[in-house]
Amino acid sequence: MALSGIQIFKMTPKKNCKECGSPTCMAFSMKVAQGAVDISACPYMSEEALASLSAATAPPMKTIKVGTGEGEYTLGGETVLYRHEKTFVSKTRYAVALCSCMDDAEIDAKIAAIPVVDYERISERMQVEMVYVNYDAASGADKYVDLVKKAAATGKTLVLGCDDVEVAKAALAECKDGKPVLNGANASNYEAMSAVAKEAGVVLGVSGADLNELYDTVAALEKLDNKDLVLDVTGASIKEAFANAVQVRRAALKDEDRTFGYPSIVNTVKLAKGDKYMQEALSSVFTLKYGSIIVMEELGYAEALPLFGLRQNVFTDPQKPMKVEPGIYPLNGADENSICLTTVDFALTYFIVSGELERSGVPINMLISDAGGLSVLTAWAAGKLSSASVAKFITENVEDKIKSRKLIIPGKVAVLKGDIESKLPDWEVIVAPNEAVQLVKFLKDMQENGQL
């Protein structure tokens, strides 16, 4: 059970802990109980008390790090089953599958396709993050090791799907510096696989014929002092895999059973059996419930666009609106002479308005100022969108880059027109329609009348 602030307070030294940012140990203890502060922030805690409290106050699901550099990802650390309860912590990561059973041409084609999907949406990079390298015994160890070398050369974090201890050793010799996941432990080999993973300093993936076997294998690994684990919950069927993913998460978070308190892997390649539409559907399902790493046959734009959009929605703090970066966004080939249009940084507003602007085909510079991630009317009511904020943004960020002196403002804040003109005397301020869908006709009419 989670400790209360009172319970934590009874175990803390009674000093004025200014170093940890709390005026009293009671206040500090309450912050720890709420998850706002880590218990290690107290400089007066004894090692024995720190060890005891750290274990008691840690999230029921362990936080695991894999990969290095830009490819380092955090998995696990979750504290709630549903996003609306608080927030999800660590994003689902998507891996493209390679197998030593493939011929060289297919392998090369799949590797060449990996960097194709790479774009930014709302300040988040969308790309293939991992490569799952599956070992096929019939193809031999040498081909697998060669495939691991090729996969490592992509710079992506690897997941090695290999349950042969000797082959796993040879593969890790080629890629262990990249901190891959060795997904190969099961009831028959867990002791040897654990030794291999610990020697290489990598996270170990664990699977089982069913949840009971998986549980017992994890418990046995913990007795071997290996707690750097991920759980492969992929079952023999879609129904079984879904049940496994949900039951493992519920056991960890609701029942506080830390034996199941690890991130999970779901292999949709095994479940979809070559049906790319089923793979896409399953990847969406397990993004919600509760895959930490999802393995896919491929991840082109057709798969990436909806998946990354879903992930971004699910793994964004519901109490913090999604925002785009303030700046100048040229659309339809706009240059320094093109007319300007300004709106707020609320992501939904940006995508709706930019979509209509692109549909118009009119070259236009979209100006996004900082409005706290609020919609137009909400930002205006809160004082985040005002004549002063618009004028300041244009003076500091636009005038030295854009020669045009025509500015379109949202129709719902037409009241700002006069004030903006008084603060920007060189600019002509034009009021847009109230609805974004009306922008296409509005801009085309302006273009035909020579107003642009």
Image (cartoon, rainbow, N blue to C red):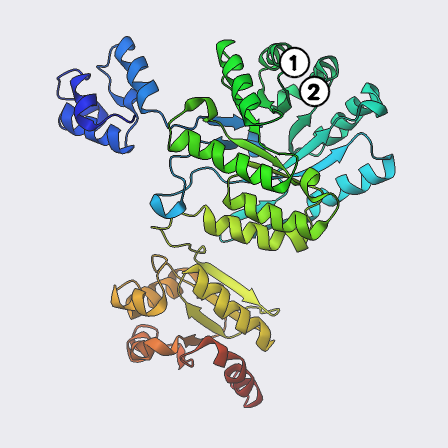
In front of the other: 94 or 373:
94
Q: Which residue is drawn at 38% across and 29% down?
A: 255
In the image, is 91 to the left or to the right of 7?
right
**Quarter of image, res 428:** bottom left
Q: Which residue shows up at 29% across the image and 67% down it?
A: 388
| 182 and 116: which is toward the camera | 182
Quadrant (top left/top right/bottom left/bottom right) for the N terminus? top left
Q: Residue at x 77, y 41 (%)?
A: 110
Q: Distance between the residues labelled 1 and 2?
A: 8 Å
Q: In this view, does 418 lie to the left or right of 105?
A: left
Q: Position of residue 390 (x, y in %)?
A: 35, 67
Dot 2 amino acid type = Asp
Q: Residues within 10 Å of mark 1 (few under 14, many from 20)?
A: some
Q: Is mark 1 on a helix, strand or loop?
A: loop
How far across and how far down the image is residue 64, in percent? 49, 26
Specify whether 42 is left or right of 223: left
| Residue at the image position 69 percent from the left and 26 percent from the top | 161
Displayed quadrant of residue 29: top left
In this orientation, does residue 104 appear?
yes
Q: Which residue lies under the disc numbered 1?
A: 189
- Callout 2: helix, strand or loop? loop
Looking at this view, is 86 or 148 the one in front?
86
Mark drawn on residue 64? none
Residue 163 is labelled as 2
Q: Residue 285: x, y in percent?
A: 55, 47
